Amino acid sequence: MDIRRDTGGRQRRRMIAWAGGGLGFFVLVVLAFWLSARPPAVAQSDIWTGSVLQGELIAEVSATGQLVAPEIRAVTNRSDGVVEQIHVLPGAEAERDTVLIEMSSPELLDELARARWQLEAARADAARERVETANELLQLEATVANADAEYLGERMELEALEELQVDQVVSDLEVQRTRFRVEALKRRFQAEQSRLDRFDELRDAREEATAARLSELDSEVEQLEKRVAALQVRAGFAGVVQEVNVEEGQRLSSGEAVARIVNPEQLIARLRVPERRAGELLVGMSVRLDVGGETLSGEIERIDPTVRDRRVEVDVTLPGNRPEGLRPDLTSNARIEVARLDDTLYMPRPPWADPDTTATVFVLRGSEAERREVRFGQASNTEIQVLNGLAPGDQVILTDMSNWSDHPRLRVQ
């Protein structure tokens, strides 16, 4: 007997299987689409947030630097020599007459001895010249006296002969000869008298020349004595020794800097401000300084017009009642107040937010975060002004979200 097969049931089961498979595939496609369209998730523990506030914001520029002493003296040696001994080290206090280093120079001592000998020899020559000049004056006076006597005697003889000539006792020739001798003796007397009259000028000229020579030699000895004294290099300036640039046994040439001395009573803070923020600064702005664990107030006194290594140097005066222990080269952290903004929007400043820039931020909306473009304005160390893109009360993710900047929304779990 033949058994009839139920082919219709088999077809129904096959159709149900195909329908179930198609439905499952559709569900998988829909699920995949839904998952792909779903915002990516970030963990709540991986982010930190801050609120947008409205009120007063003190805009500040941060900078670092160090204390410097604008009054610095470079101590130089004035003589060639060898360093024999160093009497002070950096950090020591020095007065004007404090000996910093001691040098030796046998050549300089020999040169001084020769100069002193030459000076003494010149003084002896000057004394001899004074005696010779006095003798010369006496001889000249005697010569004038002799010439005068001869002239007077010959003139008297001429007068006697002229009287005898009247009586024709003597010849005219003899009288004429006597007259010539009188004239010659007269000219000789006048010449010697002229020499005597000008002798004072000659004596003064000699004395001036001798004095100039002695002055030159005396000045040379004085300069050499100063150079010998300068072998003991003194500070010449009251302050603190900042550095000593020589070693014992080192040979130095004249004019080399051997040490630097600073005046610790006139310290300033020299800050290095980023060039992009330097345009906001003005002389006279208030500055808060953190130096050596102390907080000081100061103000800007100078802004360097040049830029070096993308930084601008700014000098800040320190208060007169500053604490003890401040010294050059101490590190200083500063906050410069550039503006007080009333009734403005601001938020906590994240590390990635710079003043006067536009940035992408994420604002929390329940369990999601929405991406926004925000324009920032001025800033302080901890807060930054919001020009547009946010409203008071918005909760902003402050964590660096640059890896998620392509997503308009994020899920916060």
Image (cartoon, rainbow, N blue to C red):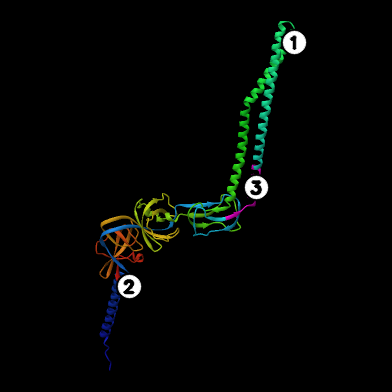
Residue at 50% x, 54% y: name it. Answer: 260
Q: Which quarter of the rendered picture does the C terminus lie within?
A: bottom left
Residue at 70% x, 9% y: name it. Answer: 162
User: Which stretch did the figure color magenta?
Assistant: 102-119
Is there CB contact under 8 Å for labels 1 and 2? Answer: no
Give the CA distance from mark 2 to mark 3.
88 Å
Q: Tell me, for residue 174, which label it has, or none.
A: 1
Above or below, comparing residue 11 to residue 146 in the picture: below
| Residue ID for mark 3 | 113
**Residue 192 appears left or right of 57:** right
Please, what is the dominant secondary structure of the magenta stretch?
Answer: helix
Q: Amino acid at mark 1?
A: Glu
Q: Nearer the viewer, residue 159 or 235?
A: 159
Q: Which quarter of the rendered picture does the N terminus lie within?
A: bottom left
Secondary structure found at label 2: helix
Marked residue nearer the N-terminal end (2 or 3): 2
Q: Which residue in the rendered view is the most extreme toward the bottom?
A: 1
Secondary structure found at label 1: helix
Whether residue 48 can be seen here? yes
Residue at 63% x, 32% y: name it. Answer: 206
Q: Which residue in the rendered view is the most extreme toward the top?
A: 167
Above or below, comparing residue 239 to residue 4 in the picture: above
Q: Amino acid at mark 2?
A: Ser
Q: Position of residue 194 (x, y in %)?
A: 64, 23
Q: Tell me, for residue 45, which label it has, or none.
A: 2
Q: Tell me, for residue 397, which label it has, or none.
A: none
Above or below, comparing residue 40 to residue 380 in the picture: below
* Magenta stretch encompasses residue 110: yes
Give the CA distance from mark 1 to mark 3.
71 Å
